[in-house]
Amino acid sequence: MVSEQPVTKSWELPDALWEVMEPLLPVKNWRMGRPTEVDLHRVAAGVFYVLRTGIQWNAVSRAEFGSPSTVYYYFQQWRDYGVFERLWTKALERYDDLEGIDWLWQSLDGAMTKAPQGGEKNRPQSDRPRETRHQTQSAR
């Protein structure tokens, strides 16, 4: 008999990640008049849903994540507060503990080619078509 694993969606926020993220969140901004009953775990799942799928903020499922404006408000607040950078740092530290990161060796990849239609031309003539013989002269 095969045991079935629950299928998780790529944007779902696991409880283990939420336990790391929750202490990084700023204290609520009481001046903004936001309700105190907001489920921040649900809001965070909505933020990661938008970041993962690329949908518009106003297309967030109200039933699954709450009000799209609330999800966007908390995203902005967390972005400005540096929550995502600190979460990234925590993730790197954890990965370093588990697998090890060689901090002395780093690699950078890049492409050094000219943009197809970018930059200045390296020639003095104009980009207009050249005149050929037997063309009508301008009245000026």
Image (cartoon, grey):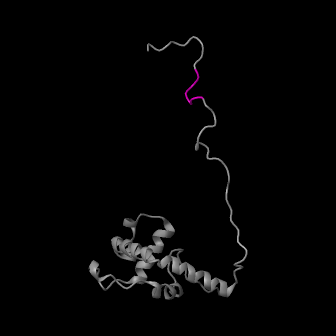
Which quarter of the rendering shows the C terminus?
top left
Residue 33 higher or lower than 50, as above or below: below
Kindly identify the residue that appears in the image at 67 percent across and 55 percent down. 111
Residue 42: image location, x then y, percent: 41, 81
Residue 69 higher or lower than 100, as above or below: above
Residue 36 seen from this side: yes
Residue 134: image location, x then y, percent: 57, 10
Residue 41 higher or lower than 61, as above or below: below
* In the image: residue 53, left or right of residue 107: left
Closer to the camera in the image, 132 or 9: 132
Kindly identify the residue that appears in the image at 61 percent across and 84 percent down. 93
Closer to the camera in the image, 86 or 38: 86
Q: How many marks?
A: 0
Kindly identify the residue that appears in the image at 32 percent across and 81 percent down. 29
Closer to the camera in the image, 20 or 140: 140
Dividing the picture into quarters, in which one does residue 127 lie? top right
Kindly identify the residue that appears in the image at 59 percent across and 40 percent down. 120
Which quarter of the rendering shows the N terminus?
bottom right
| Residue 89 forms part of the magenta stretch | no
**Which residues are the magenta region?**
125-130
Residue 71: image location, x then y, percent: 38, 74
* In the image: residue 109, left or right of residue 33: right
Closer to the camera in the image, 140 or 46: 140
Main secondary structure type of the part rendered in magenta: loop
